Amino acid sequence: MGIKLSELEAGFEIKLKISSDNSKETMDMKGVIKSIVKSNIAIIDLDYPTERRLNFDNVKVDLEYCQDENVPILWRDVKIAYYKGEYVLQAPSEGKRHNRRGCFRVGVSVKAAIRIEGKGTEMAMIRDVSLSGYSISDRRKELNIDVGDKVSVKFEDSGHNLNLVGIVVRTEEREDMVIYGLEICNICKDLSSYISVKQRHNRT
């Protein structure tokens, strides 16, 4: 499970990564989300100096979105068509975080309301967080979360209100707790700022 195109908003800057089938070279083209039509369809404006209509029929196009220092989100093999004077972009699959480098994790140790899709809401401890994931510790061993479950957490810390949605990718059972590792699958605008604040705090 990934990130829907509809999580982007009007005004968000994007980048198209364009290549031909027989070439490893990629051309980048900047653009902006003009409006969201459906969960997987958007109207886009392209930052390209030409009055000619661009044709994307015979090229491979990936869509990349990256805000500040966050891990880029990549929608692969998007389709772009020109319709009634607009460029319409369709994403056949959900976007994935494209972690091109390791993400620094910061310790959190804050209790949070944890909503497990299909299983209700519980309280547990957020252990740490990075730009691409977070982990939860369950000392009572009562959460009963499985790999593949979708888990939402909300918590306040260091002047930030965070709302993270993740997919469980690993579990680790210890004598005194169970630790769940999750991959973030939503866009959280305050995450980068929060991690920077926690990094500065941890150094002092």
Image (cartoon, grey):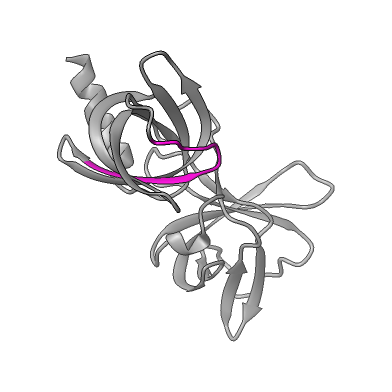
Left or right: residue 153 versus residue 172 is left
**Residue 104 is at least partly visible in this image:** no
Tell which of 56 and 201 is nearer to you: 201
Q: Which residue is at 56% across, 52% downward?
A: 95
Residue 61 % position (x, y): 67, 56
Task: From this view, report whether residue 82 is shown above or below residue 127.
Answer: below
Quadrant containing the C terminus is top left
Residue 43 % position (x, y): 52, 73
Report the number of numbered marks.
0
Extreme-bottom residue of the structure = 84
Q: Which residue is at 62% across, 82% downward?
A: 83
Task: From this view, report whether residue 160 is shown above or below residue 142.
Answer: below
Q: Is 149 within the magenta?
A: yes
Tell which of 95 and 20 is nearer to you: 95
User: To which quarter of the image does residue 58 belong?
Assistant: bottom right
Left or right: residue 134 versus residue 38 is left
Left or right: residue 130 versus residue 49 is left
Q: Which residue is at 57% across, 48% downward?
A: 74
Residue 10 % position (x, y): 40, 67
**Residue 181 is at least partly visible in this image:** yes
Residue 117 % position (x, y): 44, 51
Task: From this view, report whether residue 196 is shown above or below residue 55.
Answer: above
Q: Which residue is at 29% across, 34% downward?
A: 124
User: What range of the chain is rendered magenta?
Assistant: 143-155
Q: Is 75 within the magenta?
A: no
Left or right: residue 25 versus residue 176 is right
Tell which of 182 and 53 is nearer to you: 182
Task: From this view, report whether residue 75 is shown above or below residue 88.
Answer: above
